[in-house]
Amino acid sequence: MVIKSLEVTVVSAKDLHNVNIIHKMDPYVIVSLSNNHKQCTHVHKNGGTSPRWVKLLAFPVDEARADLLILVFEIMTKKTHGVDKEVGRVEVPIAELLEKQGDGKPKPMSYSVSLPSGETQGVLEFTYKFGEELPGGCGNTPAPEQGPTKKTDGQGWIGKLAGGFAGEFVGGIAGELAGRLFDIEQSEAAVDGPEAAVDSPEVAEGK
């Protein structure tokens, strides 16, 4: 399985259909890989029918599924009130981009923009290139299953858990023994000299 990074720079558009009646459009583009991995450009305020973005985006592409993948550009206009409106869209098969890729440098492309009505108006311009291979499990494929946790210094997680319980158990016994010895010393001090018994708590409190 080979997964490559597809780097797309959404450059600009021109002669778009104006879906606004009064004000200039504020266009932006949503780019996705077969409607997955959606990413956006910034909004070109008052960009009108010829906006410019120059936004670099990256997508993981599984070459084994290239025939099934489509790079989708949805050109939208930002609305101050209500829902943003679609201006047009461009769909480019990934297999076509793989076939046209050059020497590894960004390749400029331009495609006609399809309107919601089915007609075409305007052109979208972008560049693309396929980068280095990515580790398996990125993007379109599930992450590989991990095996059992490796032991470190001869001790796995079971050993660590058992060690923790053992440490608490031993520590508890040691604490109990120390408490008993302290009680014995206190008893002896109470018999041999009351002053020693009074001074002991002050020493313990100062520790």
Image (cartoon, helix red, strand yellow):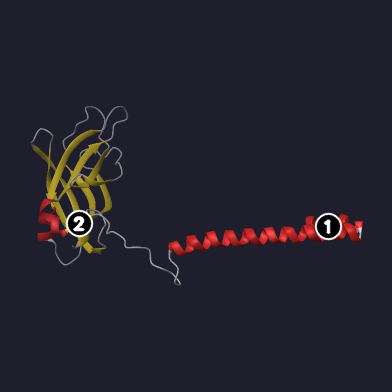
Q: How many marks?
A: 2
| Amino acid beneath label 2 | Val
Nearer to me, 130 or 47: 130
Residue 155 in the image, given as x and y percentages of width and height: 45, 68
Q: Name the residue rendered at 46%, 64% in the picture.
A: 159
Side (left or right) of 112 relative to 172: left
- Residue labelled with disc 1: 187
State which quarter of the image contains the C terminus. Answer: bottom right
Q: Crowdedness of circle 1 by 10 Å Cα count: few (<14), some, many (20+)?
A: some
First in sequence, mark 1 or 2: give its number: 2
Left or right side of 109 for 38 = right
Q: Which residue does the image show at 12% across and 51% down from the upper left?
A: 68
Q: Which mark, by number, is residue 42?
A: none
Residue that protrudes farthest toward the left in the picture: 119
Q: Is residue 207 visible?
A: no
The numbered mark at residue 61 is 2
Q: Is residue 177 above or below residue 117?
A: below
Residue occupying image coordinates x 91% and y 57%: 195
Q: Residue 110's x, y, as percent?
A: 14, 51
Image quadrant where one finds the N terminus: bottom left
Asked whether the beta carbons under mark 1 and mark 2 sit within 8 Å of each other, the answer is no
Looking at the image, is 81 positioned above or below residue 123? above
Residue 179 percent across, percent down from the top left: 72, 58
Question: Is 87 located above or below residue 161 in the figure?
Answer: above
Determine whether the residue tagged by mark 2 lies in a helix, strand or loop: strand
Q: Please tell me in which quadrant of the rendered image residue 81 appears.
A: top left
Give the CA distance from mark 1 to mark 2: 79 Å
- The kind of residue tagged 1 is Ser
* Residue that appears at 20% across and 60% down: 129
Q: Residues within 10 Å of mark 2 (few under 14, many from 20)?
A: many
Residue 143, visible in the rendered structure: yes
